[in-house]
Image (cartoon, rainbow, N blue to C red):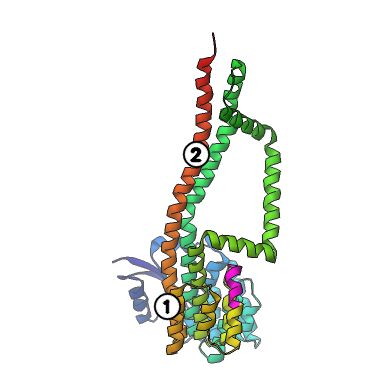
Amino acid sequence: MPVYSYRGTTREGVIVEGAIEAADENMALERLKSTGVIPLRVAAPSAKSRWSPRLRSSRADLIAFTTELSALLGAKLPLDRSLNILADVAESEELRKVTISVLRSIREGNSFADALQRHSRMFPRLYINVVRAGESAGAVDIVLSELSEFLESTQELRDHVVSAMIYPTILVVTGGLSIILLLTFVLPRFASIFKEMGTAIPLPTQIVLVTSSFLQGWWWVLLLVLIGGAAAFQNYRRSPEGQLRWDAFKLKLMQDVIRKLETARFCRTLGILLRSGVPLLQALNNARDVIGNRVIARSVDSIMAGVKEGKGISAPLSSSGAFPPLALSMITVGEETGHLEEMLLKVASTYERSLKQSVKRFIGILEPAMILFMGLIIGFIVVSMLMAIFSITDIPF
């Protein structure tokens, strides 16, 4: 059986670490609980580097904080004692300071949500609103468990997209460097040979040599233009009009991928909020904030207006035209049967799985297209030089 490393605590607050044999992670958790240990983290030894302090980010800290606090509260430990334990086991200095600050704020008489709100850099508004709803319902441990699942699924989806883009990025970088190397180091040697020969150079070769000469002498101008253009584009993209147009362009370019991504984000966020007791209008407002595409986010405004008019949520969603038909059908069934929260989460899970396939198909199309584009440029350069070399044979002796 595989061996899992674990880190946990006893009910007295003593931190324990070790390894345990189990068929899977769930069985390892059950075996630890049966020994009286409250597991904070269980992972295969190969996954240990994931928790290395040097590789941690604020997102990783948030997931660790939520998962571990959910486990402690689920074991019926008081909130202040749980936070005290988390401060002791925190693997990053930033997380330890935030946990101590939250604990101090609670001991001063503030609510848990108010204490978290003082650290908005780590805890997003969505997170705070869910915790506040859980506090009012007396179910902080339950909402933290749901938040833990939400954060982990979101991170898994993000990691999948990032890993899928690694190869295309490497392809662009290596192809671009190869083209620059050809134009700035290889072609100038041939240019001097052709100049000495005094023969007529074919037009494609002239284009390549002029480009090479420009890069050699005026590369700094091109660099300044690129930097200035990128800065101007970023400045325009940050404006409301620019952001809207850029998002509309991305939506046309990758409609299938973006719609599935935003549908999964919106439905999972809305489902978590509604299941935590957040009112529908407030939940819609918060769910709108997690949508990255402004074109789709603007359609949520019409949905909120429809909800205010008493039309429910399925009819305004359908009229907005922002979400796929399958998602709309499932949400309509959920609203009619009184299980809207569960159906929203099912929609999110369905589209997260579908999104992975869509990303895979998109990358499958993007990779050969990029290879073809780079190949055409490099091929044009090589053929241009061969044409010039073959033209040398026409020189009269």
Q: Nearer the viewer, residue 119 or 372?
A: 372
- Which one is in front, 148 or 257? 257
Which residue is found at the position 64% from the left and 65% from the top? 244
Quote the CA–CA distance across marks 1 and 2. Answer: 45 Å
Find the magenta span and give its range: 293-300
Question: Which percent across, then down, holds residue 161?
Answer: 48, 61
Residue drawn 41% across the image and 62% down it: 357
Could you tell whether 357 is left or right of 108 in the image? Answer: left
- The answer to whether any part of residue 361 appears in the image is yes
Where disc 2 sits, the SS reads helix
Residue 328 in the image, given as x and y percentages of width and height: 47, 78
Q: Can residue 67 be spotted in the picture?
A: no
Q: Main secondary structure of the magenta part?
A: helix
The crowding category of the residue bearing disc 2, from other C-alpha atoms within 10 Å (few below 14, some 14 to 19, many at least 20), is few
Q: Which residue is mark 2?
A: 376
Q: Quadrant of residue 343?
A: bottom left
In the rendered structure, are the residues bearing label 1 and label 2 in contact, judged by CB atoms less than 8 Å apart?
A: no
Label placed on residue 259? none
Residue at 53% across, 17% down: 392
Q: Which amino acid type is shown beneath numbered disc 2?
A: Leu
Horizontally, residue 98 falls left or right of residue 169, namely right
Q: Amino acid at mark 1?
A: Lys
**Left or right relative to 181: residue 334:** left
Residue 81 percent location from the top left of the image: 54, 83
Secondary structure state at the residue bearing disc 1: helix
Which class describes the residues within 10 Å of circle 1: few (<14), some (14-19), or many (20+)? many
Residue that label 1 marks: 346
Vertically, is 290 above or below 184? below
Whether 379 is among the magenta residues is no
Q: Could you tell me which quadrant the N terminus lies in?
A: bottom left
First reached walking from the N terminus: tag 1 or tag 2: 1
